[in-house]
Image: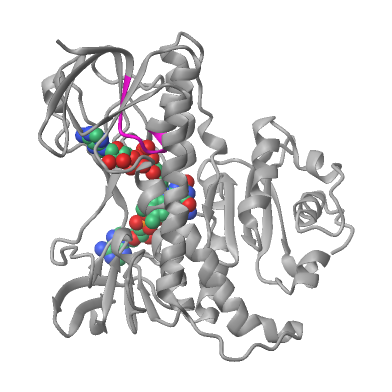
Amino acid sequence: MADQFDVIFLGAGPGGYIGSIRAAQLGLKVACVEKDKTLGGTCVNVGCIPSKALLYSSELYEQTTHKFKKHGIEVEGVKLNLAAMLKRKDAVVRQNTTGVEFLYKKNKIEWVKGSAAFIGPKEVEVVDAEGNKRTLTAKHIVIATGSAPIELPFLKFDEKQVVSNVGALTFPEVPKKLVVIGGGVIGLELGSVWRRLGSEVTVVEFLPHLLGNMDDDLRKEAKKIFEKQGLKIKLGTKVVSGKADKKGVTLAVEKDGKQETLDADAVLVSIGRKPYTEGLNLDKAGVKLDEKGRVLIDDHFRTSVEGVYAIGDCVRGAMLAHKAEEEGVACAEIIAGQAGHVRYDTIPGIVYTWPEVGSVGITEQEAKEQGIEIKTAKLPFMSNPRARCNDDLEGFCKIIADKKNDRLLGVHIIGPWASELIAEAVSVMEFGGSAEDIGRTVHGHPTLSEIVKETALAVDKRALNS
Ligand code: FAD
Ligand code: NAI
């Protein structure tokens, strides 16, 4: 006999675990199937959380070795204890995975351990690590199985020399030379971690710019700053072949028809992620995929099969934890008969390097493409008193507003704590606010957030301090 639930989430990443909690809050009987030994998915186990733990630790190391002196702090004999740094990172991950487990108990969500596969449109079979089988049925099933790193056909992951995010979070020694293929978010974050800890890092990116479709001013500034920090960046460069052996990894790269060889102790391949639906038996249930292999959904997360939904990295849109979470909440609310909704144009994109990058809304190039008439302003952190106090002077804040009505359309920040500063812009955009709304809002002094206010004033050519 199959065990009966109101809703079953497949996968316990930010989409599945937050969706499960919301569904349970709304009074539904919830099961969540997770095949890994711990809850939390990519984000908690091998993504957001461990990478941010290492980014913080490695930045403290960099500050101690390179930045303290200017503040009059002289420290001698600073030593890296990588094992301790990695151990702390693992402890942070554990705090988070056990935190999710606690929330499951609190909300009476059943964690069904094992891999799920559809055996019918309303039924899944779960096989655990010992091969035990259990059948579950529910009126509503939500696919939240996430994504996996894309591999280069000629450079298979061994997670020691040729690594994805998984191996790049666990190198037991600092690689002398690290080549990062892909100048996107993972490449710049984890490339920065290992550079700070002593690696010679080369980033190879086949587009003529870093950071995908972010604002062009921001991409250029990021390149300038990261190069100054010591990252070697090769743009417009294609990796054509690669070979790993006992001595290391050798890559052949090509730019404008000219070939070059790069030697490395390790290579991080961070060229994007693909939706993960392997082993789910989607065809058995009749669930259709789109042209990019993502689970095809409508505006209400409904797949091609009634009662089956999909959210997070395995569907269209940005592969971000907060996007997956919002979809989990909205999907649970729709299942419970409420009007769940996600607003996609105010999802911030953040890069946790130092300085950080925080961006929301449209870029200047998108405004041009869409024929929207805009007003823009851009102010450097150099003009912000708090940034001067902290000696955190790199970067800028750029605001894009609608020329007709001043409505806030996009905010792009590269600078200290941009991850936190961007939240103000997200809120104002969420309420349909204008640049003037920010310009007339009191901001504490001296704070980094004053740069957002000053830039908003500058949109109307009335900045006071710059
Ligand atoms: P996932 O988190 O991938 O979870 C899916 C879960 O489903 C997994 O636990 C998997 O084991 C399980 N599963 C799959 N198939 C089955 C099956 N058949 N049966 C049972 N279980 C199954 N995003 C941010 O917003 N901020 C960041 O700072 C950030 N940093 C990142 C850093 C790195 C290095 C990486 C790789 C990603 C980062 N991301 C970040 C992206 C973020 O991790 C993902 O967007 C997010 O985890 C997606 O959530 P999800 O629930 O859709 O899928
Ligand atoms: P990405 O899409 O951010 O960057 C991949 C980069 O690799 C792109 O610039 C692309 O042009 C380049 N590329 C692709 N193929 C290439 C090739 N053959 N040779 C050279 N360059 C190539 O993907 P990334 O960094 O792998 O991250 C995956 C996902 O994880 C992203 O969607 C991101 O949203 C998410 N993530 C989010 C983080 C955050 O929010 N801070 C942190 C890390 C990951």
Residue at the outermost bottom position: 76
Can you say which quadrant of the picture contains the C terminus? bottom right
- Color style of the picture: one colour
Q: Position of residue 213 (x, y in %)?
A: 46, 53
Percent position (x, y) of residue 243? 14, 76
Q: Is 141 above or below relative to 1?
A: below
User: Measuring 33% from the left and 80% from the top, which residue is drawn there?
Assistant: 175
Residue sitting at 80 percent across and 38 percent down? 437
Q: Is residue 320 visible?
A: no
Horizontal side of 433 relative to 197 (left or right) equals right
Which quadrant of the view contains residue 220? bottom right
Q: Is residue 352 left or right of residue 258?
A: right
Q: Residue at x 41, y 47 (%)?
A: 44
Dividing the image into four quarters, tell me where ligand 1 lies. Answer: top left
Residue 106 visible to an observer of this rendering: yes
Q: Is residue 170 above or below residue 304?
A: below
Q: Is residue 257 above or below residue 309?
A: below
Q: How many marks are shown on the rendered structure?
A: 0
Q: Quadrant of the N terminus?
A: top left
Nearest to the observer: residue 410 or residue 295: 295
The quarter of the displayed image where residue 331 is located: top left
Q: Is residue 30 found inside the magenta-colored segment of the image?
A: no
Residue 49 placement (x, y as % from top left): 46, 52
User: What are the residue bounds of the magenta stretch?
Assistant: 8-15
12 magenta-colored: yes
Q: Give left or right: position of 130 versus 305.
A: left
Residue that sits furthest to the right in the current view: 464
Q: Position of residue 158 (x, y in %)?
A: 18, 65
Q: Is residue 31 left or right of residue 136?
A: right
Residue visible at 37% across and 38% down in the picture: 13
